Image (tube, helix red, strand yellow):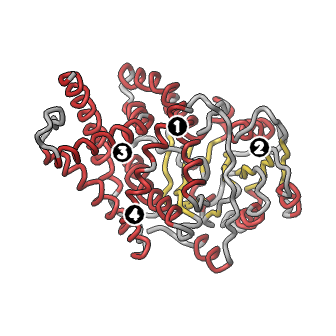
């Protein structure tokens, strides 16, 4: 049993160290300063879809926000997808003089089904659009958003993800931890992959898809993480998913750990579901066709397993410090390699926060951020256990920004 455990523990260490160093090396490409390119004249025509399920408290603000975008009003239309709403979401949308589309389907519930329904309706309309942009009802969007999407489309990009930020970072330690995760991931994952020619990951909101892609491949992403699933579909079909660092979406996040835990369990259910369904195809194409983007996408899909095994390895390392005489706790590589990995885990995020000009009072959140990180371990395990459950759980949104805060973020520009 001793040798069986040691063999298993060695295998886990190799797995964790490979993924750790893989992510650390790639993350370095996200640290360089971002330059904003000059905008092309507005040309592309957009359909903006706002996914809404019982969002009467926040729907008005995003509609007003979208009407203020720095883009010719004749070149975009706003559609509110009122999905199984039984509150005043539809009424408010109509009063704002945008197109409110009502969908009622008690069986096919969830954002993936709502988007497919919306796209099917859109393509039957007389007016044709170059691209579709999707937001959630709780979002706020930077004024330059469509200009940046227009730039990418003119340059031949087909699927674009905007910069994901937090609408309410200072509401609680949970929302601030979530915001830190956004700010760090945007650079070490998303921006780094853009610079390496790898695919970004769609974030569920603030993304743009050319209509010819949707018409060719359809929208068949029906998992609990339809954004992740569509990313994998694009990757398998050699469609680049690009990151736009200078177009920002501010997303509302749960204030309590209970609500955040439930939301992230749903994310991990969908993530594990996609992992089991797409990993084989990604690996096959990666090795048979030499597509490194497919290999990188596979690495992203198995990320939850790293969280779990990371926790196990860290526990064993701590045990080794206190019980060095225990023979079954042996590290396959010297402590030096683990300390480097741990060093990168803190130095890179802090460097990112400085690059993103995060206020010092928010940066202090790195002290309790590890506590938030630890919660991903049980979430990953629960998500794995419940991966076959497809029940959509709605997250309540009610954060409406005061005018001062609203004006400051929609006019904010990234350096």
Which of 132/404 is in front?
404
Q: Which residue is mark 1?
A: 383
- The label nearer to you, 3 versus 1, is 1
Mark 3 to mark 1 CA distance (whole Å): 30 Å
| Mark sitting earlier along the chain (4/3) | 3
Q: Residue at x 75, y 62 (%)?
A: 63
Q: Which residue is mark 4?
A: 368
- The label nearer to you, 4 versus 2, is 4
| Mark sitting earlier along the chain (4/2) | 2
Mark 4 to mark 3 CA distance (whole Å): 32 Å
Q: Which residue is mark 2?
A: 128
Residue 268: percent from left, percent from top? 52, 40
Q: CB of mark 3 within 8 Å of CB of mark 2?
A: no
Helix, strand or loop at mark 4: loop
Mark 4 nearby-residue class (10 Å; few <14, some 14–19, many ≥20): few
Q: Is residue 333 above or below residue 142?
A: above
Q: In the picture provided, is 35 more to the left or to the right than 40? A: left
């Amino acid at each position: 049993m001793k040798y069986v455990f040691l063999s298993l523990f060695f295998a886990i260490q190799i797995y964790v160290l490979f993924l750790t160093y893989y992510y650390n090396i790639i993350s370095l490409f996200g640290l360089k300063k971002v330059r904003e390119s000059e905008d092309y004249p507005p040309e592309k025509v957009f359909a903006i879809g706002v996914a809404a399920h019982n969002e009467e408290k926040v729907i008005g603000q995003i509609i007003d926000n979208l009407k203020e975008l720095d883009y010719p009003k004749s070149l975009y239309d706003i559609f509110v997808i009122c999905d199984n709403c039984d509150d005043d979401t539809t009424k408010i949308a109509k009063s704002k003089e945008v197109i409110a589309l009502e969908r009622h389907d008690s069986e096919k519930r969830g954002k993936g089904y709502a988007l497919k329904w919306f796209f099917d309706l859109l393509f039957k309309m007389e007016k044709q659009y170059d691209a579709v942009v999707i937001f959630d009802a709780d979002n706020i969007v930077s004024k330059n958003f469509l200009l940046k999407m227009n730039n990418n489309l003119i340059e031949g990009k087909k699927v674009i993800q905007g910069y994901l930020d937090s609408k309410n970072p200072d509401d609680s330690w949970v929302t601030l931890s979530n915001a830190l995760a956004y700010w760090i991931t945007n650079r070490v994952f998303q921006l780094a992959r853009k610079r390496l020619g790898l695919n970004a990951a769609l974030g569920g909101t603030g993304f743009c898809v050319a209509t010819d892609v949707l018409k060719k491949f359809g929208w068949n992403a029906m998992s609990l993480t339809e954004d992740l699933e569509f990313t994998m579909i694009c990757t398998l079909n050699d469609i680049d998913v690009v990151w736009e660092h200078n177009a920002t979406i501010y997303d509302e996040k749960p204030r309590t750990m209970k609500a955040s835990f439930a939301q992230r369990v749903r994310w991990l259910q969908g993530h594990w579901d996609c992992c089991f369904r797409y990993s084989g195809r990604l690996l096959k194409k990666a090795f048979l066709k030499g597509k490194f983007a497919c290999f990188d996408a596979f690495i992203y899909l198995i990320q939850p397993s790293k969280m779990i095994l990371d926790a196990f390895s860290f526990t064993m390392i701590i045990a080794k410090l206190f019980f060095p005489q225990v023979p079954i706790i042996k590290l396959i590589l010297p402590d030096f390699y683990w300390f480097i990995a741990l060093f990168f885990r803190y130095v890179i995020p802090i460097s990112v926060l400085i690059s993103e000009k995060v206020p010092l009072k928010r940066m202090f959140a790195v002290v309790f951020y590890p506590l938030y990180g630890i919660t991903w371990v049980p979430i990953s395990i629960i998500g794995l256990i419940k991966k076959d459950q497809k029940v959509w759980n709605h997250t309540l949104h009610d954060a409406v920004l005061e005018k001062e805060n609203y004006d400051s973020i929609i006019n904010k520009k990234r350096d």
